[in-house]
Amino acid sequence: AQAAAGEAGVIASGFLTTLDNAAFANNALWHATELEGNSYPECVSIYNLFPPMLAVAEKYSLSGRQVLEACIIGHEVQARLGLMVNPNPNAPQSAKFMNIGVMGIMAIAAGTAKLLQFSAEQTVNAISLAASQACGIVKQTGSMAHFVESGFTARSGMLAALLAKAGMSGRPEILETKGGLCDIMTGGASYDPDTTL
């Protein structure tokens, strides 16, 4: 409907669209099956990383090895953040926000940064810009919004990376500073920025 530039394919559709729209559509479709490999106690999932990373790989003719590296790096980012902010890692259902969406945005930004060979500064900016778009509400589970949240996550993470590539910046300490993402998500409770898996 947008007559968008054909940069990457939409799964099972027969058409191409922009990179961020392909990431949106493919992630929403991927999640619609609910066949997901969630990991606990960090409450994140690697399934939301493959569709956007594959879209980037398609546009730039990148290898499967590069896609796997980007997904692994993205998962490391979201898993560490998930461990930092979970109010009760033994009962992930107690959270009101959907870690898969909230942390996934930073994961997709980081994975895209890896695929596009960003500098360290560009990568930090991509993650910072992604943090400002964090979304996902557990209460949406059971509705179509729950599935499309994965699409929002992919598009927002991808857009954050593309904006950083274009020179946009964000605060480098936005994840761990007072009033930053982790502080907001924990309600000001203490968290360990050196959390390891």
Image (tube, rainbow, N blue to C red):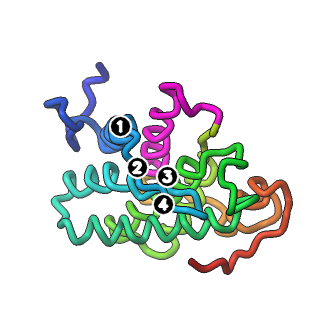
Residue 160 is tagged as 3
Inter-mark Cα distance, 4 to 3 = 11 Å
Q: Tags 4 and 3 in contact by the CB under 8 Å rule?
A: no
Picture coordinates of residue 46, whole percent (x, y): 41, 58
Q: Tags 2 and 3 in contact by the CB under 8 Å rule?
A: no
To which residue does mark 1 refer? Answer: 33
Residue 150 is tagged as none
Of badges 1 and 3, the one in the foreground is 1
Q: Amino acid at mark 1?
A: Thr
Instruction: Check the picture and name the quadrant holding the C terminus.
Output: bottom right
Residue displayed at 78% across by 54% down: 184
| Mark before the other along the chain sequence, 1 or 3 | 1
Inter-mark Cα distance, 1 to 2 = 8 Å
| Label 1: how many Cα within 10 Å (few below 14, some 14–19, many 20+) | few
All told, the count of numbered labels is: 4
| Label 4: how many Cα within 10 Å (few below 14, some 14–19, many 20+) | many
Instruction: Establish if 186 lies above or below 79.
Output: above
Inter-mark Cα distance, 1 to 3 = 26 Å
Residue 36 is tagged as 2
Picture coordinates of residue 166, whole percent (x, y): 43, 56
Q: Amino acid at mark 4?
A: Ala
Q: Amino acid at mark 2?
A: Glu
| Mark before the other along the chain sequence, 2 or 4 | 2
To which residue does mark 4 refer? Answer: 107
Please provide the residue range marked out in magenta.
139-160
In the rendered image, residue 157 lying in the magenta stretch gets the answer: yes
Q: Tags 1 and 3 in contact by the CB under 8 Å rule?
A: no
Of badges 2 and 4, the one in the foreground is 2
| Mark before the other along the chain sequence, 2 or 3 | 2
Residue displayed at 56% across by 33% down: 141
Q: Tags 1 and 2 in contact by the CB under 8 Å rule?
A: yes
SS at mark 2?
Answer: loop
